[in-house]
Amino acid sequence: MIATDKDRAGRGVTAYGVGRSFGSKTVLDHLDLHVPAGQFVAIVGRSGCGKSTLLRLVVGLDKPSAGRIVLDDAADIGTTTRIMFQEPRLLPWARVLANVAVGLDPRGDADQRRALAQQALHEVGLGDRAGDWPAVLSGGQKQRVALARALVSRPRLLAFDEPLGALDALTRIEMQRLIETVWRDQGFTAILVTHDVAEAVALADRVLVIEDGRIALDLDVDAPRPRRHGDPHLAALEGRILDHLLGDDDAAAPSSRAA
Amino acid sequence: MSRIAGLVPRNGAGWILPLALVVVWEAASRLGGLPATVLPAPSDVLAAAWRLLRSGELTANIGVSGLRAISGFVVGGGIGLALGLANGLSSLSEKLTDTTLQMVRNVPHLALIPLVILWFGIEEQAKLFLVALGVFFPMYINTLLGIRSVDPQLVEMGRAYGMGRWALFRHVILPAALPSVFVGLRYGLGIMWLTLIVAETISASSGIGYMAMQAREFLQVDVVVLSIVIYALLGKLADSVARQLERLSLQWHPAFQTA
């Protein structure tokens, strides 16, 4: 199977007036969003702001209560989108290679599946760990295997649900670089949900801040790649986003301090 | 100490204590401290075993008891496994049957012996029924527990990666439930022998329990002791087989990984 440029291109996604409520609690409220093909978008916001809910709607793990989400020229989102979770979620009873092959169509030829899985493992730098059990891997290595599992089917849209949140600082920077590299190589559309504003500006073309179920801030990050940690332009952007996120707190602080 | 440990073969340490007991027992009998009418010497028990082996009585009785144990276990364990799986996977099936099963579980199955004798006499069905009933519950409860405790995050991952119902069962739910199923299996094996001993002692015309009761009538204490030893050895054998199976199918489990 030879991938043409069109096959490898990312797939854009558009949300039209999307709402999602759980019981009486409204998490997303008439949210409109267009992510063009191949863009790297980061979504930040406070805990419970609905950013993970939006991501789950995009990959079809959940259904919107109002509005709709449309992928560019795709009827079936199952084969073109993949999600990477905060936890690796590897099957402990399957060896590393078999865990990566979970990302492939089970009806495919066994030899070809093995070859594709091995190649994906190689891409994440774990080509020599194919025969290991997940239990013997470190946290960062497990998350690499999960990345290989997400990549192996060559998705056109890859959703990241805080996949680096549980990693130590150095491993996290390594993973950020890895994700950026594969994104540049493969050109999929990437949507990253994160708590870490520095991570968002380091990786993304565009940062969205979600507040009260809506997009409160939509910023382009136009710094050239590869980006350096500690770049003053990125730091200024990070400061702006943080100010926005903390803005409500600053207003409320004096009264609470008086009390 | 390590020198002694080095002399015994691997996994042989568990046999040191039983062997020492046998030596002390033999010595006590030879020195006249232990009358043969209370407890015959191990050598006398061995002689009885040889005698019964040559007459063919021993093999025939072991064969009969073994067949009862295995068939009862297969029937009861099979139904327990099937119902455990059904009730773990389908809430409709659980609603229909679980209450009834929990009520029946609280009746000790050995309390049914008078009823079983009325129903089946002392024929083979009586033993099969009792063993099957005894083995059923540990298999049922542990299988159900195993399926209940499957990590929902793995199930969600499976769904997100396009697994159908069968693939989800085969690759996620069943392997996750397997350790618990093995607990039920080993528990069931213990109950299998217990039930069989009681059933054969009370009502039988063949088998090891019957052999022991006959010997009691003729005051052949050596044969009575031999029967008890055979039960112990068969129980140990069944447990070893189960552990071997467990080891083979739970290689991935950290508890079974040998460095």
Image: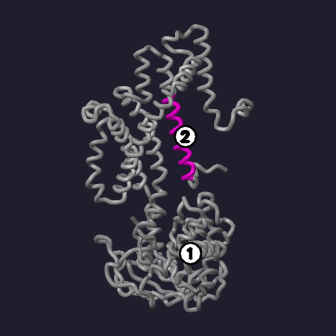
Residue A241 seen = no
| Location of mark 2 (residue) | B240
Location of mark 1 (residue):
A109
Q: Chain of mark 2?
A: B
| Residue B134 image position (x, y, % from top left) | 36, 39
Whether residue A9 is situated above or below residue A83 in the rendered picture: below
Q: Residue at x 48, y 25 (%)?
A: B227
* Residue B244 forms part of the magenta stretch: yes
Q: Amino acid at mark 2?
A: Ser
Q: In the rendered structure, which amino acid carries the disc numbered 1? A: Asp
Q: Is residue B57 above or below residue B254?
A: above
Residue positioned most to the front = B55
Q: Main secondary structure of the magenta part?
A: helix
Name the image quarter holding the C terminus of chain A: bottom left
- Between B258 and A27, the residue placed more toward the observer is B258
Q: Label 1's element?
A: loop
Q: CA distance from mark 2 to mark 1?
A: 39 Å
